[in-house]
Image (spheres, coloured by chain):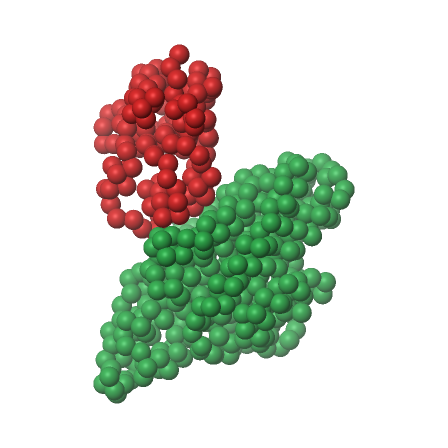
Chain colours: A red, B green
Amino acid sequence: MCSLSDGDTPLQVIALGNRYRGDDGIAPLLLERLMVSHSSEVVGHDWGDSDALTLAHDLLQLEGDALILDCAELGQQAGSWRLFDEAALCGYRGHSTHGLGLADALALVRPLGFVSTVHCFGIQPADLSDREGLSEVLTEQLPAIESALFTTLNALREARGT
Amino acid sequence: MDSTRKSYNIKIDHVTRVEGHGSIRINTREGVVEEVKLEIVEANRFFEAFVKGMLPHDVPQTVSRICGICCVGHQLAATKAVEAALGIEVTGQTKLLRKALNESQFLQSHALHLYFLAVPDFVGSRSILPLASSHPELVRRALKLKKLANDYTAVIGGRTLHPMANGLKGWRKLPEPEAMAGIRERLEASIADVEQMVELLATLPIPDYQRETEYVSLKHPDEYALYEGEVFSSDTQSGVPAEGYREVSNEFTVAHCTTKWSKWHRESYMVGAMARVNNNYAQLHPEAQRVAETLGLKVPCYNPYMNNVAQMVEMVHCTHNSIALLDRLLADALVDEDISYQPRAGQGVGAIEVPRGILFHDYAFGDDGRCTEANAIIPTSQNINNVEQDMKAFVPQMLPVMEQDELALHMEMLLRAYDPCISCSVHMLDVQFV
C-alpha cells in the first residue's frame, strides 16, 4: 500500500460535487472509496456543492497540500480525466465575482495567507441531470478513474519529495 | 466643468454586484436632466403560474426556488400563507424555530451584501477580490461570518440552501441540541468580529443625500418585527393586516421594467433594513441601538445610502437575538409534533420580513385541495419605484459637483444600497400556455 503523506502532513483530499446531480457525484464517491483503502494516509473532506465563499473559508482552515476532486468540462469523452495545477486551473479566464467558482475562491484566499499547493483532478461527466447515481458511462469507467487517481496521488507524493 | 455645459450619456448595462440584471440610463444635456431610468431587464419568472395544481405541502418547497439567496424567506412566507388558507395553527416551538431560521438568513444575506457587494465601493475597489490584498482581515472576518450564518441555517433548517426541515404545521426533522449549542457558542464568539466590522464601517464615507419617502415594514407590539406583525406605514403611523397587502402595494407596470412597481400613500415607498429601523428602532436590541448611534444612524433617516448601515445594525440585532432564541430552544427538549394536515379549500396570506424588505405570499386552494391561485409581492419590486425616484432626485444635486464617472458610480452605489434581488422581483400572474 502506498504512502501518500509527506510524513508530517497528510495530503488533504477534497471532494466537490452534488450526489443528486448524476455524475456530479463522482468526486464524493471516489473520496468514499479512497477513504476505505487509504484512510491512514490522506485526510478526506467531502465539501459537497459548497459555494465559492464557503470553499474559500474552508480552504483557509486546511493544513497541508490539497488535491481537489471534481467533475469538470474538459471537452473530452465522458470518463476522461486530467490533473490541473493551480496555474492551469486559474489561468483560463480573468477572475470575477459574477458566478464565483473554484478558481475565484483560490484567488481570494492566496492573499489571505493560504500557502498550500493545490491540484485538481477533473473528471469529464456524461450526465449532470437531477438524479442519484452515476451515468452508465462513468459507472463503467469508475475502476479506471480510481486507478488513475491512485497513480496521481503517488506522483504527487513523489513530487513532494517523499 | 461648469454644470450648464454638462451633457452626460450614462448607460450602465448591467449594474454589477447586485443579484440579477438591471441597467441605469441617465441623460443630461447642458446641465439639464432629460432622462433617469432604472431598467429591469430580467426575464419573467412563472412561479405563480406553475404552482397552480400543486398540493399545499409542495407549494412552499417549490417557491423557495424563486431565489437561492432568499430561499428561506419565500419558504416561510409561503408556509404561513398556506397555513392561513388551511386554518392551521402552529405551536410556540415551531414559531421559535422559524424565527431562528429567518434570522439565520438575515445574518447570511446582510453579511454577503455588506462585505462582498457594497463595501468594495467605499474602499475604492471594484470587487472583493482586490480587497483580499488591501483589507485581508476584513475579508477573513466576512468569510467567517458568512460561513457561520450558512451553518446556522443548516443546523436549524436541515441544509443551507432550500432547507427542508420546515414544513406545514411544524418541523419534519428537529435540529440536534448539540448542534444548536455549537451555533450559539459561535454566535457568541462572533460578536467581537462583528464589532470590528462596525469599527471599519464607521470609517467609510457614506454619501449624504436625503429624500423623505414612505417607509413600510412589519410592526409587532412585543418585538422587532421580522417574523410577524401588521403592515405599518411611517406616513400614517398605523398598520393594516397582511391580508390587505394589495391595498398596500397597488402594483402597476411600467414600460421599462419587467418588475412591477408599487406605491401606497405617496408616489413610492421603501422597504428593507432602513424602513424597519425607522419604524421599529425602539425594539432593536440595546447593542444594535448602540451600534446605530456609533454609525450615525438617527431615526427617522431619509438617506437611502444608509440602508447599508441599517443592515449592519440588524446584523448586530440578529446576532444577539439569535443567541436568545437558541437559549429558549435549548431550555426545553424539542418535541416531535404531529404535522399531518387535511387539504381543503381556502385562501390565505403570509407576510414576513426578509433581508430586503417585507414579502407577501398569497395562495388559494380548491375543493380538491390543490392550488388554484398564487401571488407573491417581492420586496425588491416594491423598492424599484423608490430607487428610481431617488435617482431622479439626486442626479440634479450631483450633476453640478460630479464628473460623469463619479455620478455613474454614485447611482450604482445607490442601487446596491437597496440590496436588490432582481431575479426574485420579476413575476407574471396570468400565463397562457400554448
Residue lying at 57% horizontally and 75% vertically, measured from the top left: B298
Residue lying at 59% horizontally and 66% vertically, measured from the top left: B291
Residue lying at 37% horizontally and 36% vertically, measured from the top left: A116
Looking at the picture, how far across and down is residue B382, in whole percent? 49, 65
Extreme residue toward the right, this view: B332
Name above or below for residue B172 compared with residue B316: above
User: Depth check: B76 or A41 in front?
Assistant: A41
Q: How many marks?
A: 0
Q: Is residue B228 left or right of residue B254?
A: right
Q: Is residue B112 left or right of residue B175?
A: left
Q: Does residue A101 appear anywhere in the picture?
A: no
Q: Is residue B314 left or right of residue B380?
A: right
User: Depth check: A55 or B386 in front?
Assistant: A55
Looking at the picture, how far across and down is residue B36, in whole percent? 33, 74
Extreme residue toward the top, this view: A1
Q: What is the quadrant of residue B282 in the picture?
A: bottom right
User: Depth check: A96 or B373 in front?
Assistant: A96
Looking at the picture, how far across and down is residue A44, in whole percent? 45, 27
